[in-house]
Image: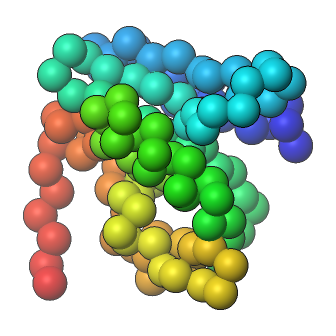
Amino acid sequence: MKKKGTRFERELIHILWENGFAAVRTPTSGGGISYPMPDIIAGNGKKYIAIEVKMRNELPLYINEQQIKDLAMFSNLFGAEAVIGLKLPRKKWKFFEIEQLKRTKNGYKIDSEVFALGFDIYELIGKLKQLRLE
């Protein structure tokens, strides 16, 4: 599972670079550092994004509270927008702000209702604004 996650992180990094964002994977496991770090940090000099990458075969996706707290803490200190990037099979990447997630007893979740509200990579990087009907 880790190998597949790494592949998806690299795919996302390529997309970001191709769209004018410098992007790096952060060494979060086995690095001996206990500071909160997202999976990917990206920026273009105007906009900075901290991304916690998730991949699942199906919804819902559950995220523990500490991961969200760590993402929020890093993003606040770094001056980055905190987002969860989710990749489902045969679907394009979707991105979510923390405020969009549903609260659960032990953290947060993305279900089909939240998934429908996610934004795509071009909305994330500011190249496209999707009109949403409320």
In this rendering, position of residue 115 left or right of residue 77: right
In this rendering, position of residue 23 left or right of residue 52: left
Question: Where in the figure is residue 35, as x and y percent of width and height?
Answer: 63, 33
Q: Residue at the spot x=60%, y=21% of the render?
A: 25
Question: Where in the figure is residue 9, as x and y percent of width and height?
Answer: 62, 30
Pick the quarter of the image with the N terminus.
top right
Pick the quarter of the image with the C terminus.
bottom left
Where, by quadrant of the figure, is residue 58 drawn? bottom right
Where, by quadrant of the figure, is residue 106 drawn? bottom right
Where, by quadrant of the figure, is residue 15 drawn? top left
Looking at the image, can residue 6 be seen?
no
Identify the colour scheme used: rainbow
In this rendering, position of residue 2 left or right of residue 90: right
Q: Residue at the spot x=37%, y=71% of the render?
A: 100
Looking at the image, can residue 115 be seen?
yes
- Seen in the picture, residue 70 relative to 132 is either above or below; the reply is above
Report the front residue among 75 and 61: 75
Question: Where in the figure is residue 76, as x and y percent of width and height?
Answer: 34, 42
Question: Where in the figure is residue 3, as x and y percent of width and height?
Answer: 85, 31
- Seen in the picture, residue 43 relative to 73 is either above or below; the reply is above
Q: Residue at the spot x=59%, y=43% of the render?
A: 53
- Seen in the picture, residue 75 relative to 54 is either above or below; the reply is above
Q: Residue at the spot x=85%, y=37% of the render?
A: 2
